Every structure is written in structure tokens, then in C-alpha cells.
Amino acid sequence: MESETARQILSKLIEGLDPDTGKPLPTDSVLHRAPVMRALLAGLSALRLSAARAARRAQLPENVGKSWDDEEEATVVNLFKSGTSLDDIARAHGRTSRSIQLRLEHLGVLRTRSSFKTASDQPTDPQDPGRTSQEDT
């Protein structure tokens, strides 16, 4: 059974209607009991959350959460060192820009923000995004 069908059935039952006919259920139906109604509402809520999670996941790049291998790391480092932007590298590898940045930090190619010697609002050196322009002084 598909999630949408299950959501429609649960919604009808919560409304006190027979899902097939749309007619009101008998007043002595077990579905009118508070614990049963709470269970139906919980089930409907879980299905909605699952659908929302799946929709968000579908918008993410294809390799989000996948392990890195040595070859991909080397390619990312070479692209970055050749001047390719983090956004372009991310698109090419099906990852987020932030994951590319974090991987480059992990590999020691970029310094982490916590290792900066100056305030985070200082302008960065365009040749080295991990370095502020004031570090040369």
C-alpha cells in the first residue's frame, strides 16, 4: 500500500467515515474510543513526517551521506587547487558545498574556522579561502 493511500484511509477513519463508502461509522464503533483515535492520529502524523522527510531528501545531492574513497578525495583536492569553486566541485560530485569544505578541512587543504587567528568577519584572501588577508601583515 502506498503512503498516500494509507494517509487517505486514516484521514477518513479519523473523520469517523468508512473509507470505502464515505458514510459515517456506527457510533458504537471501536474507532470512536479515545486510545484508538490517538493511535490513528499518531499513525497519520508518522506518515506525514515520513513523506516530508522523503521530499527533503529528494532535494539533496545524490551522494549526500555516502562514504568518501581515496580517488574522490584526490580529485576534489586537485579540483580545488586548480581553482574550481566549492559549488562547482559539489555539483560534479553530487555532494553539498559544505561537505566539500569539510572534507578539504579534514584533509588539511583548508584550515578550520576554529584555527583562524583573526575574527571570522575579516575578509578572506581570494587565493586562499582558509586564510584572511590580514594574516600577511
Image: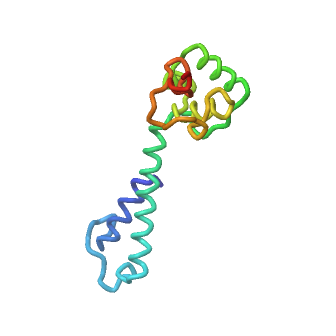
Q: Does residue 75 sit above or below 65 in this rendering?
A: above
Residue located 33% across and 71% down the image = 14
Please say whether residue 73 is visible from this viewpoint. yes
Left or right, residue 100 beside residue 19: right
Residue located 42% across and 51% down the image = 52
Residue 5: where, in percent of width, then height?
40, 55
- Res 113 → quadrant: top right
Q: Does residue 106 sit above or below 17 in this rendering?
A: above
Left or right, residue 74 beside residue 124: right
- Res 82 → quadrant: top right
Left or right, residue 12 beside residue 48: left
- Res 69 → quadrant: top right
Q: Residue furthest front?
A: 137
- 120 and 37: which is toward the camera: 120
Residue located 44% across and 59% down the image = 47
Left or right, residue 60 beside residue 28: right
- 57 and 27: which is toward the camera: 57
Residue located 45% across and 31% down the image = 122
Q: Does residue 135 sit above or below 44 in this rendering?
A: above
- 106 and 87: which is toward the camera: 106
Q: Residue furthest left?
A: 23
Residue 110: where, in percent of width, then height?
61, 29
Residue 121: where, in percent of width, then height?
44, 35
Q: Residue furthest right?
A: 70
Image quadrant for the C terminus? Answer: top right
